Every structure is written in C-alpha cells, then in structure tokens.
C-alpha cells in the first residue's frame, strides 16, 4: 500500500510540474495561486491519508495563500 501512495504522490508532482509549463502567459499572482493550490492539494492529501475532502480543502487553502503572496524585488 505504501508503494501505491508513493506512486500517487510522484505522479501528482509530475503532473503539477507539467501543468506549470502552461503558466508562461500568466501573471505572477496567477502563478502563485496555481502553485499554492497544487502544493495545498498534495499536503492536504498526505495529511488526511488521501481523503478527497482533505485534498480539496488543502487546494482551496493553498490557492488562497498563494494568491495573497506578494513578491517583492
């Protein structure tokens, strides 16, 4: 079972990385939102043992946090 979880996490991260290649035309705030949502989904899923509610909740919280991040030079 642990091998399946590792495979799912690895596949999720690979999908996220490939998905971010489509972010070239996005604003920095949009990129931060997408990254936050992706990271939140992974963390939420891991913390709740793969629960769909935990994954969706983590994505929502991560997206909000990512949206609020201000990048300063």
Image (tube, rainbow, N blue to C red):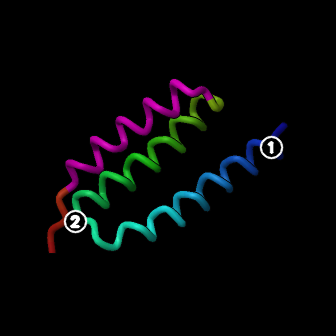
Find numbered disc 2 in the image and state the secondary structure of the residue it sits on. Answer: loop
Report if residue 60 lies within the magenta region: yes
Label 1 crowd bin: few (<14), some (14–19), many (20+), radius 10 Å = few
47 versus 36 height, above or below: above
> Residue 31's spot in the image, x, y percent?
31, 61
Taking 23 as reference, is 45 left or right?
Answer: right
Taking 27 as reference, is 3 left or right?
Answer: right
Residue 65 tag number: none
Marks 2/1: CA–CA distance: 35 Å
User: Which badge, 2 or 1, comes first in the chain's sequence?
Assistant: 1
Name the residue tied to disc 1: 4
Report if residue 64 lies within the magenta region: yes
At a point 44% along the width and 65% down the height, the residue shown is 20
Taking 44 as reference, is 46 left or right?
Answer: right
The answer to which quarter of the image holds residue 5 is top right
> Residue 49's spot in the image, x, y percent?
65, 30
Label 2 crowd bin: few (<14), some (14–19), many (20+), radius 10 Å = few
Main SS, magenta residues = helix
Q: Quadrant of the N terminus?
A: top right
In the image, 73 versus 9, the foreground residue is 9
Find numbered disc 1 in the image and state the secondary structure of the residue it sits on. Answer: helix
Name the residue tied to disc 2: 27
The answer to which quarter of the image holds residue 60 is top left
60 versus 51 height, above or below: below
> Residue 13's spot in the image, x, y percent?
59, 57
Magenta stretch: give its range. 51-69
Closer to us: mark 2 or mark 1? 2
Taking 6 as reference, is 45 left or right?
Answer: left
At a point 28% along the width and 44% down the height, the residue shown is 65
At a point 54% along the width and 44% down the height, the residue shown is 42
């Amino acid at each position: 079972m642990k091998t399946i979880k590792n495979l799912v996490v690895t596949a999720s991260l690979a999908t996220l990385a490939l998905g971010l290649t489509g972010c070239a035309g996005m604003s920095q705030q949009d990129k931060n939102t997408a990254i936050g949502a992706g990271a939140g989904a992974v963390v939420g899923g891991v913390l709740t043992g793969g629960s769909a509610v935990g994954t969706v909740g983590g994505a929502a919280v991560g997206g909000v946090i990512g949206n609020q991040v201000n990048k300063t030079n």
